[in-house]
Image (cartoon, rainbow, N blue to C red):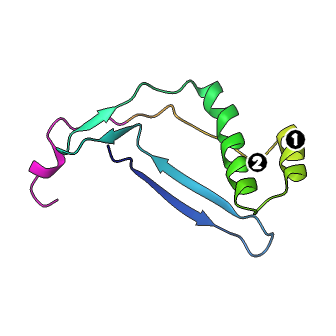
Amino acid sequence: MARCSLASIRTRFVNFNPHVHVLAADGAFLPDGRFVTLPAVPGSLLAEGFPRAVLEFLVNNDALSEGLRSRMLGWRHSGFSAHNEVRVPAILTPLKSRQGL
């Protein structure tokens, strides 16, 4: 299975505010080109798990200290947000069979 996502890293130089916008597929492509949609992740689980996963990734890659990660997880307004209310229905034809792709 192949996963699909698109990310854009944004920064503002006036008031240093690096952030990432991500559009992620809620499924995966099978080898024959069909897209398999996975069940929606509950919003509360996504809101809790997303910051933990990102901060853990940064700690594991020496981009953030464990102490700062712990403090950030305690912040009331962490700066993280996740939205999964909009879902795009899967196209039923295999990707390989669509003309022009």
- Where is residue 44, by image quadrant? top right
Q: Amino acid at mark 2?
A: Gly
**Above or below: residue 35 compared with residue 64:** above
Q: Amino acid at mark 1?
A: Trp
In this picture, residue 78 sits left or right of residue 58? right
**Above or below: residue 83 compared with residue 7:** above
Q: Residue at x 71, y 54 (%)?
A: 60
Task: Give x and y (percent) for residue 37.
Answer: 34, 31
Q: Residue at x 61, y 39 (%)?
A: 82
Q: Secondary structure at mark 2?
A: loop
Q: Please say whether residue 89 is visible from this viewpoint.
A: no
The region drawn magenta spans 88-101
In this picture, residue 44 sits left or right of residue 66? left
**Residue annotated with mark 1:** 75
Contact (Cβ within 8 Å) of mark 1 with mark 2? yes
Task: Give x and y (percent) for residue 97.
Answer: 9, 49
Q: Residues within 10 Å of mark 1 (few under 14, many from 20)?
A: few
Q: Please say whether residue 15 is visible from this viewpoint.
A: yes
In this picture, residue 57 sits left or right of residue 79? left
Task: Give x and y (percent) for residue 4.
Answer: 39, 50
Q: Residue at x 41, y 37 (%)?
A: 26
Task: Give x and y (percent) for residue 86.
Answer: 45, 34
- Where is residue 80, by image quadrant? top right
In the orientation shown, which residue stands out farthest toward the bottom? Answer: 13
Residue 51 is marked as: none
Q: Residue at x 87, y 41 (%)?
A: 75
Quadrant for the C terminus, please.
bottom left
**Above or below: residue 8 compared with residue 50:** below
Residue 79 is marked as: 2
In-front residue for pair 34/19: 34
Q: Secondary structure at mark 1?
A: loop
